[in-house]
Amino acid sequence: MGRGRQKAKHTKLARELKSFSPDLNVAALQREIGVPAEEDEYVDKWADMYADEDEDEDSQTRETA
């Protein structure tokens, strides 16, 4: 007989969680996940670490020619 009460309790809890909608602070969420402020241009922070592939191919064709 205990199963009926347990099931009813879980059903009640599930209904409460389903209808629960917390206040959402978008600005705080953006700060937390690190979304940059509106930038007009994409900047690749790793671009300076490696040479461009096009330049590598050009130098290889010059060396073989």
Image (cartoon, grey):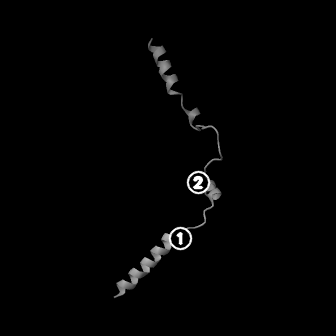
Q: In this view, which residue lies farthest toward the left?
A: 1
Q: Amino acid at mark 2?
A: Ile
> Is residue 38 shown left or right of residue 1?
right
Image spot of residue 3 (x, y percent): 35, 83
| Residue ID for mark 2 | 33
Image spot of residue 16 (x, y percent): 50, 74
**Vertical relation: 43 (above or below) 21:** above
**Vertical relation: 46 (above or below) 52:** below
Considering the numbered disc 1 on the image, is that residue within a helix, a strand or a loop? loop
Residue at the spot 57% in from the left edge and 34% down from the top edge: 47
Residue at the spot 53% in from the left edge and 70% down from the top edge: 20
For the N terminus, give its image quadrant.
bottom left
> Is residue 6 shown left or right of residue 32?
left
For the C terminus, give its image quadrant.
top left
Residue at the spot 39% in from the left edge and 85% down from the top edge: 5
Which quadrant of the figure has residue 46? Answer: top right
Considering the numbered disc 2 on the image, is that residue within a helix, a strand or a loop? helix
| Residue ID for mark 1 | 20
Q: Amino acid at mark 1?
A: Phe
> Is residue 30 shown left or right of residue 5?
right
User: N-terminal of the two: label 2 or label 1?
Assistant: 1
Viewer-proximal residue among 20 and 63: 20
Residue at the spot 39% in from the left edge and 82% down from the top edge: 6
